C-alpha cells in the first residue's frame, strides 16, 4: 500500500474515517483519482500508556477516545476537546488521526497538540519519523506529512496533577465549526501563575501559540485583571484573523481576547489558585 | 480505478453481497441497491443527520461513508425497528408526543435515539439535546421531539423491567 502512495501517476488520497473528506468529495472540493482506505488496519486502533505517555493509534475512533477512562482521567484537555468535535455520529466514524492529518484551521486537536507538545509518528516505505506538533501543522489543510507517508500514531504527555487546563470554544451551535477557541494549561507555584501555555484556534490558517499571553501571566498572581490583560496581549499578537460569513476578522480578534482570558481563569481555578 | 468492488454487509440481520462502484455512498447503496428506502438522504454532506443508521451498534451518517467502507460490518436501519405491525417504543412515543410532522428527518432521529437510549436508558433533557444536536428538523421546533425521546426512554425502561423482552 505504501508503494501505491508513491505512484506519482495517481492522485491518491488517504481515507481514514472520512468525516471531513466525504463532505469534500460530495461538494466536489476534492476530486482524487483514488482513495486508499485504512479501515482494515486494525493495528492502528489502540489507546495505551507507553513510557508514561498516552499513545493513540490514528485509526482509533473519536468516540473511543471520548469513552476512554485513561484519556478522561489522565489527559482531560484532550478529552474535553474530543467532546467538542462534531456530534456523536461524527465521532463514531471519524478517527483521531484524521483530524490531525486534515489540519482544518477550526479543528480542536491541532490546538491541543500545540498546547501539549504532542508528537506525531509517520511511516513510509523507508521507515518512520516523529514530528513535533510545532513542526507538524504547516498551513490550511496542510501538514508536514509527505505524500509517501501515513500518520500512524499521536502521542501526548499525561497532564500533571497540579496542572490546570481549559478548553474554550465558541460556535453558533454545538457541533458547528468553531468561530474561535483556546486551549490553555497552567500551574500555580507559590501562589503565582507558572508554565502557562496558550494556544488559539479557528482564527488563522493553523492553530497558533500565543507566547505574549503566556509571558503576561507567568510569575503573576492569578486574577481577573491579569487574565484580561493576557487576553488583550493575545488578541494583539495574532496575525490578521480569518474573515468569512460567520465572523469578521475584528470579531474573531475580539473572541481571542475573550477565549484566552476565560481559559486562563478556568485553568487557574483547576490548578487550585484563588482569583 | 473505478472497477466495482465486492461488498458483503449484514443489514438488519440479513447478509447481502453486491458489486458496487467505489464512489457510491452507503446511503445510496442502502436505498438504490438494497431498496431499503427508509433511510432518508437530506443534505448529502453530513449536516442534517436524516441518513443516520447504526454501524456495528454505533450511530453514523450513511452519507458520509462509502458503501465499500461498510464491507464486513453489521448495519441497523429504520426498517428493523417495528416488529411487523407492532411499533417500536421509540416510534410509538414519537406518535404520542407529536415528534414528527412531515417525517423526512424522522428515521435519523429514531436511529440516533436508539443509540442514545441503549447507552443511557434515563437521559436528562440536556443529554437528550446533546445527543440530538446532529439532527435537523425543520417542522417541529424540537420540543416535541425531546418530549418523545423522554417518553420513549420511559417505555423502554418499563419494557426491559417487565420482561426479558429485547429492544430492537
Image: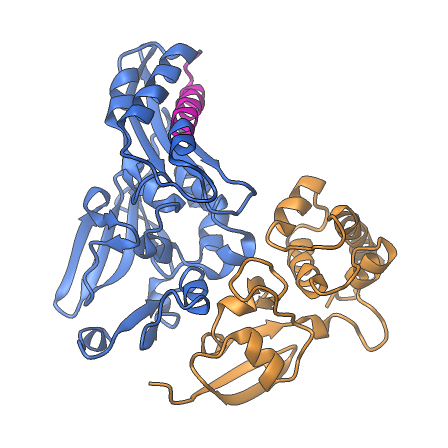
Chain colours: A blue, B orange
Residue depicted at 82% across the width and 57% down the height: B93
Residue A107 lies within the magenta run? no
- Observer-nearest of A11 and B61: A11
* Residue A26 image offset from top left, x and y in percent: 46, 68
Bounds of the magenta span? A255-274
Is the residue A240 above or below the residue A275 in the image?
below
Note whether residue A53 is visible.
no
Note whether residue A110 is visible.
yes
* Residue A237 image offset from top left, x and y in percent: 27, 27
Quarter of the figure with residue A11:
bottom left
Residue depicted at 29% across the width and 35% down the height: A240
Residue depicted at 55% across the width and 64% down the height: B61
* Residue A10 image offset from top left, x and y in percent: 23, 78
Q: Quadrant of the N terminus of chain B?
A: bottom left
Q: Main secondary structure of the magenta part?
A: helix
Q: Is residue B89 left or right of residue B45?
A: right
Q: How many labels were placed on the picture? A: 0
Q: Residue furthest left?
A: A126
Amino acid at each position: 500500500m505504501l508503494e501505491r502512495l508513491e505512484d506519482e501517476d495517481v492522485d491518491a488520497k488517504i481515507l481514514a474515517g472520512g468525516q471531513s473528506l466525504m463532505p469534500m468529495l460530495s461538494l466536489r472540493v476534492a476530486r482524487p483519482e483514488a482513495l486508499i482506505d485504512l479501515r482494515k488496519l486494525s493495528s492502528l486502533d489502540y489507546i495505551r500508556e507507553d513510557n508514561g505517555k498516552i499513545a493513540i493509534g490514528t485509526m482509533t475512533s473519536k468516540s473511543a477516545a471520548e469513552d476512554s477512562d485513561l484519556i478522561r482521567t489522565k489527559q482531560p484537555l484532550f478529552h474535553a476537546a474530543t467532546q467538542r468535535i462534531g456530534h456523536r455520529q461524527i465521532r463514531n466514524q471519524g478517527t483521531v488521526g484524521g483530524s490531525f492529518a486534515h489540519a482544518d484551521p477550526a479543528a480542536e486537536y491541532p490546538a491541543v497538540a500545540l498546547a501539549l507538545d504532542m508528537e506525531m509518528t509517520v511511516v513510509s516505505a523507508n521507515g518512520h519519523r516523529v514530528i513535533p506538533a510545532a513542526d507538524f501543522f504547516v498551513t490550511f489543510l496542510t501538514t508536514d506529512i509527505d505524500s509517501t507517508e501515513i500518520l500512524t500514531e499521536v502521542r501526548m504527555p499525561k497532564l500533571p496533577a497540579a496542572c490546570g487546563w481549559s478548553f474554550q470554544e465558541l460556535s453558533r451551535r454545538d457541533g458547528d465549526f468553531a468561530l474561535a477557541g483556546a486551549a490553555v494549561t497552567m500551574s500555580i507555584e507559590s501562589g503565582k501563575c507558572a508554565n502557562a501555555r496558550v494556544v488559539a484556534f479557528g482564527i488563522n490558517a493553523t492553530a497558533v501559540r500565543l507566547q505574549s499571553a503566556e509571558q503576561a501571566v507567568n510569575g503573576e498572581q492569578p486574577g481577573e485583571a491579569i487574565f484580561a490583560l493576557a487576553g488583550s496581549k493575545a488578541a494583539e499578537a495574532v496575525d490578521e484573523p480569518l474573515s468569512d460569513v460567520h465572523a469578521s476578522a475584528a470579531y474573531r480578534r475580539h473572541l481571542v481576547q475573550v477565549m484566552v482570558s476565560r481559559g486562563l481563569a478556568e485553568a487557574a481555578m483547576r490548578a487550585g489558585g484563588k482569583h | 480505478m473505478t472497477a466495482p468492488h465486492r461488498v458483503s454487509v449484514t443489514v438488519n440481520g440479513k447478509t447481502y453481497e453486491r458489486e458496487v462502484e467505489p464512489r457510491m455512498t452507503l446511503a445510496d447503496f442502502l436505498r438504490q441497491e438494497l431498496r431499503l428506502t427508509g433511510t432518508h438522504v437530506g443534505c448529502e454532506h453530513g449536516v442534517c443527520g436524516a441518513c443516520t443508521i447504526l454501524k456495528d451498534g454505533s450511530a453514523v451518517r450513511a452519507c458520509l461513508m462509502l458503501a465499500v467502507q461498510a464491507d464486513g460490518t453489521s448495519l441497523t436501519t429504520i426498517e428493523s425497528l417495528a416488529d411487523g405491525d407492532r411499533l417500536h417504543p421509540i416510534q410509538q412515543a414519537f406518535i404520542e408526543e407529536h415528534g414528527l410532522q412531515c417525517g423526512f428527518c424522522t428515521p435519523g432521529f429514531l436511529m440516533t435515539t436508539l443509540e442514545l437510549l441503549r447507552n443511557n436508558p434515563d437521559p436528562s433533557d440536556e443529554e437528550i439535546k446533546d445527543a440530538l444536536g446532529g439532527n435537523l428538523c425543520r417542522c417541529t421546533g424540537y420540543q416535541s421531539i425531546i418530549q418523545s425521546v423522554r417518553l420513549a426512554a420511559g417505555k423502554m425502561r418499563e419494557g426491559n423491567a417487565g420482561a426479558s423482552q429485547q429492544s430492537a
